[in-house]
Image: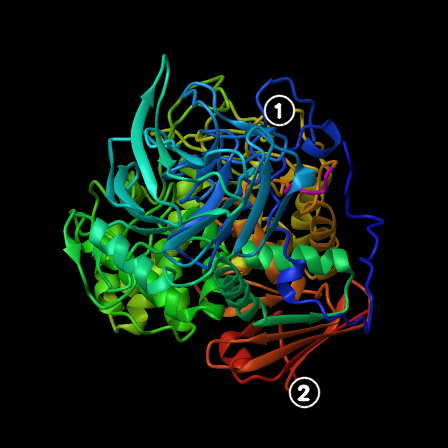
Amino acid sequence: MKHYLLAGLLALGVCPGCHTDKQLTDYVNPFLGTATLWDKEDLGYERHKKSRTWGAEVFPGASLPNAMVQLSPVTMYRSGAGYQYEDTVIFGFSHTNKGHWNLLHLPVLPVTGTVDPDDFCSGYSHDDESAAPGYYQVFLKRYEVNAELTSTLRCAYHKYTFPADEEKKLLIDITRTNNPVRGHSIHKVDDYTFAGNQDAEGNLRFYAVSNYKIKNIAAVKKDRHEVTVVEFAESKSSRPLELKIGFSFVSEANARMNLEAEMLDKPFEQVRSEANETWEQLLSKVQVEGGTEREKGIFYSCLYRSFLWPALRSDVNGEYTDEQGNVCNNGFRYYTNPSFWDDYRNKLILLGMISPDVTADVIRSITDKGEKRGGYMPTFFHGDHASTFVAGSWLRGIQAFDLKRAYRLLLNNATVPGKGGRPYLDEYIAQGWIAEKDTTNVPTWDEYKAAVTKTVEYAYDDYATALIADELGDTANRDLLMKRSENYKTLFDPTTGFWRGKIADGSWIKDFDPYYPYYAYMYREANAWQSLFFAPHDPEGMVKLYPSDAAVDAKLDSLFTEPWRNYEADNMTGFIGNYCHGNQPDHSVPYTYYFIGKQEKSQAVLDSIMNHYYDMGKEHLAYSGMDDAGEMSAWYVFNAMGIYTYSPADPEYIVSVPLFDKVRFTLDRDATFTITRKGTGKKITSITYDGQPIEGWFVTHDQLRQGKELVITTE
């Protein structure tokens, strides 16, 4: 196991004054995060399971920022994003993706010869594979077909170069996605067009136009599986087969409309070039100087990866299918729900800093959903962090949405027990904490209440909702929720220095091992070590739960030095002691040193994480953990810039030592602020903004919007 401890961490290499004519998109490696960790030195434990650990679960295919379409290869179904770098075959190219064992609508594969629906995947080599923002290419060995893919917001462009003496065919794996397929259809529209639908986590309609005349469309079934094969007339030619597909979650007619609006009259190279330019414009919002080529590659790959989710679900005319199955048009773009438990920490704030119009429409979307699904704001997986997203966005000046409507839903989440709101809210309201089951010997993977994590996260969600109440003048609920925001203290056990579960009678859970990881017993996907120090709204009060700053210092040092006890948990990899960067729960813990006057210790940890945990494994293509929605990537982006969303509900950022000498960041209103690092040490000696000293460790969003220079001096 690699030991990346506090002492002796080397400063990262820099290359001052290096200049290049490269585009920023050239720094992006869409394969970064696609590999899986296997070796003990990377995992942090000896792997005994035959199944792979969870990787970053990201896809390498073509997409635009927050698009409807993600056009990417499928190397294995039910495997996160459908692509794992170590796999050796491709089943098709699917059109939707998140990386969370779902989606993968409408897989398509170019084939030749007789089709076997039980055996049609093709081998490939990474030597004959490439990817860039908005583009993917691979040579399919079995069929000797070179596949090139690009996309627009709602459309996919397939370009397949077949052997000239082979008849061109397309295999559509229409009965399969990562989700159960509830229904599907496909029919010929005219000599060059076919259309249909696939209903699987959304009923996706498609309208596909080919440059070859269609001869036949037929279902082919064998023992295990059924596919659809499209054959083309007079297709023995060196001219590539090109397929342009429009998509819609509303109707086939809208899929055609999207295709005609975005792609139909454009050649492949134009669509690819426009996709690259879209990404170049987004990436250019953040320009860095200094650092190594490796660091720039990780940085811009992470920035790219931060803008793939949530995904668009409305058409060019504004229509979308709502939570009740009705077709609506309310004048905004409709998006999927964010992955709140992951993304609220950092990614959703980064989204708002660069794409505030998308952020406003995402909030409109979740408000629309909440009003149509029982009066509760949507949640995701755990906690109630839409509250943080809404508060943090509004207080940063993103106000093109109805705050009162969003607040009504969030207030219901916080105060009205019921299906669709916060689980176990009645317990939380009555006693200020949630009880856990009194049991022993809980296996890691068993599902319980995750009562400790829920309690401390609800306290922070109460704080975020209180900020909105204050904005709207609802002083009674503001005061109620602010009082409840102190509930994070209710499960702190001073005898152990951990947050610890209680059973219904109020006594501590006796079967308590702070090293043992759980999926949902007491803690959510964590152990007690990884669940330390979570009160982003009250860090000073949090550290005062301990008898002294020295006690906090010792606890933190132990977190980063006490070795992982070789437990195998699929979503826990990448350890510094018991700190686990491979999952989200403790991503804000390193900053706790700030609040006991030991900022330089935080920086040692942050530097080690950035240097070791984002291009791991033998191919240097693995993250230390999951990034299916961009949180891991956004963590790197912020910390490499030298600011982080310690309390994302608050419009401010904790300042750290930037990885780069200079960062120029253009916010939504074209105000460009600059972050400059002076010195090469880990200890910050001064922070100034526009030449004026900043007291404490935080810079406000309003200050950054002034477009001045933040100078961080170190020794």
Q: Secondary structure at mark 2?
A: loop
Reading the image, the residue beneath label 2 is 691
Measured as percent of width and height from the top left, residue 35 is found at: 63, 37
Image marks 2 and 1: residues in contact by CB distance under 8 Å:
no
Where 474 sits versus 335, above or below? below
Quadrant occupied by the C terminus: bottom right
What amino acid is at disc 1?
Tyr
**Which residue is at the far bottom?**
691
What amino acid is at disc 2?
Gly
Quadrant occupied by the N terminus: top right
Q: Secondary structure at mark 1?
A: loop
Measured as percent of width and height from the top left, residue 499 is found at: 51, 40
Per the model, the C-alpha gap separating discs 2 and 1 is 50 Å
Q: Residue at x 20, y 42 (%)?
A: 418
Where 573 sits versus 148, above or below? above
The image quadrant of residue 184 is top left
The image quadrant of residue 380 is top left
Q: Residue at x 74, y 51 (%)?
A: 611
How packed mark 2 is, by other alpha carbons closer than 10 Å (few <14, some 14-19, many 20 or more), is few
Q: Which mark is residue 567?
A: 1
**Which residue is at the far top?**
223
Residue 410 visible in this rendered orientation of the protein? no
Q: Residue at x 62, y 69 (%)?
A: 697
Q: Which mark is residue 48?
A: none
| Position of residue 618 in the picture relative to residue 643 (left or right) | right
Residue 173 visible in this rendered orientation of the protein? yes
